Image: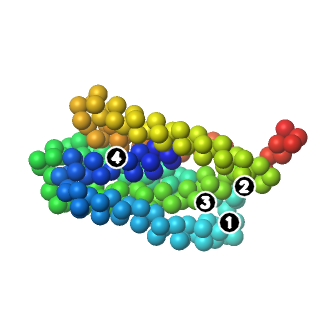
Amino acid sequence: SRASFSYGLLAWLPSFLSSALNVTLTKSSFLSILPYLATVAVTTIVAPTADSWEKNGMTRTNVRKLSQTLCFGGGAICLALVGLVVNSTPPEAVTQTTVITVMSLLTVCFGMGAWVRTGLFCGHQDMSPKYASIMLGITNTAAAIASTLSTFFTGYFFSISGGSWGWSLFFPIAALQAITVLLFQSFKSDPVDFDKA
């Protein structure tokens, strides 16, 4: 889910801005970086906020779950809204307000994505400090494969959906993020001794 979110959007955002929102290539390059700048900005507050939650009595597992819910839950809502806006606005009817709305939603979405740093990315260390690097390597390898596939499937969905950006890019990623929130909520991040398991 994280891979399709990051890399799928990274790969397709300039094309989306150009074809769906009639944004020139020069302007598209500038607008494409705004959501990523939001990630950088929000990243500066994520760790101190998560630390304060834990210091104020929230369990580490609940901090991880809340962080991941903010990341993927917030992202799913924003991406679904972008899909709705794009599907209801043909390219010839796009206005500056449409572009501002879509870019604002994408910027909030990517800003919320910064919460992965105190959610999923910390889970490996929480579960097994001894094997955290191996676990992170395995999950990042799986994410790299998923990101490659997400780029392909976005193009495939785009062709079979008649060129619908909502149904090819935004709704599928939003659905994956919503499913991931539910899965993440069902697990704990209690330590595991893999040497004894």
Q: Is residue 125 left or right of residue 40?
A: right
Q: Earlier in the sequence, mark 1 or mark 4?
A: 4
Say whether residue 178 is visible: no
Amino acid carrying mark 1 in the image: Glu
Looking at the image, which residue is at 72% across and 55% down?
125
Identity of the amino acid at label 3? Thr
Q: Earlier in the sequence, mark 2 or mark 4?
A: 4
Q: Is residue 51 above or below residue 69?
A: below
User: Residue 119 is drawn in which quadrant?
Assistant: bottom right
Callout 4 secondary element: helix
Amino acid type for the residue under numbered disc 2:
Gln
Mark 1 vs mark 3: give the one in front: 3
> Can you identify the residue that label 2 sits on?
125
What residue occupies the far right of the structure in this picture? 196
Label located before the other in sequence (1 or 3): 1
Residue type, label 4: Trp
Q: Secondary structure at mark 2?
A: helix
Q: Nearer the viewer, mark 1 or mark 4?
A: 4
Quadrant location, the C terminus: top right
Q: Are marks 3 and 4 in contact (CB under 8 Å)?
A: no
Using the image, determine if residue 152 lies above or below residue 127: above
Numbered badge on residue 118:
3
- Tag in front: 1 or 2: 2
Measure the C-alpha gap from mark 1 to mark 4. Answer: 37 Å
Q: Hey, which residue is sitting farthest front in the picture?
A: 26
Q: Residues within 10 Å of mark 3 (few under 14, many from 20)?
A: many
Q: Position of residue 71 (x, y in %)?
A: 50, 54
